[in-house]
Image (cartoon, rainbow, N blue to C red):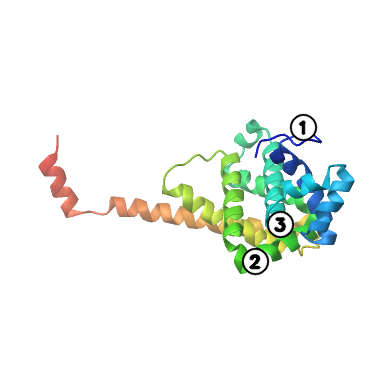
Amino acid sequence: MTTPTPSTGETLDELRLRLAPKVAENAAFDGWSRRALETTAAQMRVDADIVALAFDGGAVAMIDAWFASIDAGMAATFAPDVLAGMKIRQRITALVEARLAIMARQREALRRAQTVLAMPQNVVAATRLGWRAADGIWRAAGDNAADFSHYTKRATLGAIYAATLLVFVNDESEGWADTRAFLARRIDEVMRFEKAKAKMAERAEMRFDPVRFLGRLRYRA
């Protein structure tokens, strides 16, 4: 929706993105509820009815907006030339850790969000939001693949990211060391698998194929 709101001149999309971090802050105490919206409206001095309209859709709409604000915050954390100087593994790790840093003060809100998204009626929304996060990370890392790997990369990273968040919400180690170690292990496992898969493909390509050989003889230039 792009119609400006009467009290702020912002579109509802802009208002939603601006208020989302404050909604998450209040959701840590009040849950992803109407009360969290009302508290946010009072704190940010925005008409409560407009805030309710901006987050029409309940808890999932609020969580969606918060995750969108995290997407935006992650994208703004690194200049493109900084990421360009990193290896792909370092880029992915840095981008995921940037997201964790943004959510660090709202881990209770994240825990409550995970509970909401785990409900059977919210599985589709949870899948969509997980895919969006993984896609945002890969795009920020410079991946613009349009082939089948586009989907496999995002599916794999989405699973790693979701598992990392489950560790993160309960991590009491200094500087989230346990979460960082968990993330590093998962990424390392994927990288080893990708290398092994590439070697297998290379070996398959080099294996003698009599049908292919005869075809080349028949249709050689």
Alpha carbons under labels 1 and 2: distance apart: 36 Å
Near mark 3 (Cα within 10 A), the count class, few <14, some 14-19 or many ≥20, is some
Look at the image and tell me whether residue 97 can be seen.
no
Return the residue at label 1.
9
Q: Quadrant of the N terminus?
A: top right
Q: Position of residue 180 (x, y in %)?
A: 70, 56
The answer to which of marks 1 and 2 sits earlier in the sequence is 1
Give the amino acid at mark 1. Gly
In what element is the residue under mark 2?
Answer: loop
Tell me the residue at 62%/63% (across/down): 122
Q: Residues within 10 Å of mark 2 (few under 14, many from 20)?
A: few
Q: CA distance from mark 2 to mark 3?
A: 15 Å
Q: Position of residue 72 (x, y in %)?
A: 69, 41
Type of amino acid at the residue the image marks with label 3:
Gly
Nearer the observer: mark 2 or 3; the answer is 3
Q: Nearer the viewer, residue 34 or 149?
A: 34
Determine the image quadrant of residue 5.
Answer: top right
Residue on which disc 3 sits:
58
Q: Residues within 10 Å of mark 1 (few under 14, many from 20)?
A: few
Which residue is the site of mark 2?
A: 118
Disc 1 element: loop
The residue lying at 23 percent from left, 54 percent from top is 208
Query: Which badge, 1 or 3, is on the more N-terminal residue?
Result: 1
User: Do the residues under discs 1 and 2 have CB atoms within 8 angstroms?
Assistant: no
Could you tell whether 124 is left or right of 102 in the image? left
- Whether residue 48 is visible, yes or no, is yes
